[in-house]
Amino acid sequence: MKKLLLIAALATPLLSGCIVAVSDGEVEHSWTSEHSNWEKTQRNNRKKISQLNIGADYQSVLNTFNTPDFTELVKKGNSVYQVLYFATNSKHSDGKVTKDECTPLVFKDAKLIGFGDTAMSEIL
C-alpha cells in the first residue's frame, strides 16, 4: 500500500499538465481558425454580391448564399420589398454580426433592384 501511495505521489506532478478536450466536431480549435473563418465568409459574400445582376430572382440569389444574417420584408403601395443582409465588413472582432457590418440586398417584387446603402435609401 505504501508503494502505491509513493507512486501516486511521485506521478501527480507529472500529470498536472495534462488536458483532456472533448469536442462534438463543431468547435473551432483556435482563435486563428475562427478569425479566418469569418473573414473567409465575408470575403465570399463580397465576391458573390459583386457578381449579382439587377433583376436577379430572389430565390436564385438566396440559393447562392448561406442563410442571411438579417432579413426584412415590407409592403409599400402595391410592391413588396425584401431585404437580405449578409456580413461583408466586420468592424469588431467580437463574434457578433450587426447590420452595420452587412451589405443589404434589396428586392422589389422578388427581383433584385440593388444592394448597399444607396439601394436601401431608395425604399426608405
Image (spheres, helix red, strand yellow):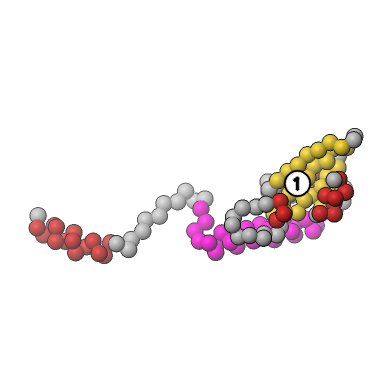
Furthest residue toward front:
124
| Residue 32 forms part of the magenta stretch | yes
Q: Looking at the image, which residue is at 84% across and 36% down?
A: 75
* Mark 1 crowd level (few <14, some 14–19, many ≥20, 10 Å Cα): many
Determine whether 60 is above or below 8 in the image: above
- Tell me where residue 33 appears, x and y as whole percent: 55, 61
Side (left or right) of 11 relative to 116: left
Furthest residue toward top:
78
Side (left or right) of 2 relative to 71: left
Side (left or right) of 70 relative to 81: left
- Tell me where residue 25 appears, x and y as whole percent: 49, 51
Q: Secondary structure at mark 1?
A: strand
Furthest residue toward left:
2
Which of the image's four quarters has the C terminus? top right
Determine whether 1 is above or below 79 in the image: below
- Residues 119 and 100: in front is 100
Residue pointed to by mark 1: 84
Q: Amino acid at mark 1?
A: Leu
Image quadrant assignment for residue 74: top right
Residue 111 in sight from this viewpoint? no
- Residues 16 and 22: in front is 16
Magenta extent: 27-52
Q: Looking at the image, which residue is at 52% across and 50% down?
A: 26
Side (left or right) of 103 relative to 118: left
| Residue 22 forms part of the magenta stretch | no
Furthest residue toward right:
78
- Tell me where residue 14 appears, x and y as whole percent: 26, 65
Q: Looking at the image, which residue is at 78% across and 47% down?
A: 61
Instruction: Label the magenta part by its dominant secondary structure.
Output: helix
- Tell me where residue 24 appears, x and y as whole percent: 47, 48
Which of the image's four quarters has the N terminus? bottom left
